Each structure stands twice: as structure tokens, then as C-alpha cells.
Image (cartoon, rainbow, N blue to C red):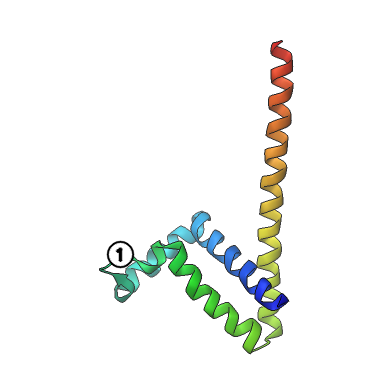
């Protein structure tokens, strides 16, 4: 059960990085250009332009490596990506708390 949760968190981290990081946008556009066979006429978009489609295939790939083949080097890499995503989530949470505190301070100085 923990491995499935681990796979889900790793997949979310990879999809977040793939769709949010500027260097990954360049790489994603190159892959989209090189793989026209992954374009869906039904959806009118490429598979890598859809976070749900991309997440499904990333999850299948990660599931194979984490659950089926326990490769230590990949497990360490996936743990690094997961730790990075947890760091960015915590950074966002603390950023929201800081903004809320600053808004309270500014609101009190207006009175």
C-alpha cells in the first residue's frame, strides 16, 4: 500500500515539474515536435499537452520501476524528486502564511 502511495506522489511530482518548470517546457516542446504520432485528433492536442494523459503514462512507467523492478538507483532518484516536490509544497504553504500575516499587518496599520 505504501508503494502505491509513493508511486502516486512521485507521479504528481513529475507532472508538476514537467508542466511548471521553464526548462521542461523547452524539452516538452522538443518531444512534441519529434513525436507527431502521439497527437490525438479526437482531443485536438498532443498527449504531452494534457496533464492527465501525461500523468497516466508517467504513473505506469514509475509503477513498473518501483513496484515490479526494485532498482535502487531509480528508487533514490524518485525519492529525490518526491523530496523536491514536498519542499515546493511546503514553500507554497509558508508563502501563503507569510502573505496572510503581511496582509494582517497592513490591515492593522490602515486603522
Measured as percent of width and height from the top left, residue 104 is found at 72, 24
What residue is rendered at 45% in x and 58% in y?
25
What residue is rendered at 67% in x and 86% in y?
71
Identify the image quadrant of the N terminus. Answer: bottom right
What is the quadrant of residue 13 in the picture?
bottom right
Identify the image quadrant of the C terminus. Answer: top right
What is the quadrant of residue 11 in the picture?
bottom right
What residue is rendered at 71% in x and 27% in y?
102
Outermost residue on the top side: it is 111
Above or below: residue 108 compared with residue 36: above
Above or below: residue 56 compared with residue 21: below
How packed is label 1: few (under 14 Cα within 10 Å), some, or many (20 or more)? few
Most foreground residue, 106 or 17: 106
What residue is rendered at 68% in x and 72% in y?
6
Q: Is residue 22 left or right of residue 4?
A: left
Q: Tell how many labels.
A: 1
Outermost residue on the left side: it is 41
- Which residue, given by chain and number where applicable, does mark 1 sit on? 43
Most foreground residue, 88 or 51: 51
Measured as percent of width and height from the top left, residue 3 is found at 69, 78
Q: Helix or strand or loop: what does disc 1 sit on?
A: loop
Measured as percent of width and height from the top left, residue 48 is found at 41, 66
Q: Is residue 83 left or right of residue 17?
A: right
Amino acid at each position: 500500500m505504501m508503494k502505491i502511495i509513493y508511486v502516486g506522489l512521485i507521479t504528481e511530482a513529475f507532472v508538476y515539474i514537467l508542466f511548471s518548470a521553464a526548462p521542461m517546457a523547452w524539452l516538452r516542446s522538443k518531444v512534441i515536435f519529434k513525436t507527431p504520432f502521439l497527437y490525438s485528433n479526437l482531443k485536438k492536442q498532443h498527449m504531452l499537452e494534457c496533464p492527465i494523459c501525461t500523468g497516466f503514462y508517467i504513473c505506469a512507467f514509475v509503477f513498473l520501476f518501483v513496484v515490479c523492478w526494485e532498482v535502487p538507483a531509480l528508487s533514490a532518484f524518485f525519492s529525490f524528486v518526491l523530496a523536491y516536490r514536498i519542499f515546493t509544497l511546503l514553500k507554497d504553504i509558508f508563502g501563503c502564511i507569510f502573505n496572510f500575516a503581511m496582509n494582517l499587518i497592513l490591515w492593522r496599520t490602515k486603522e
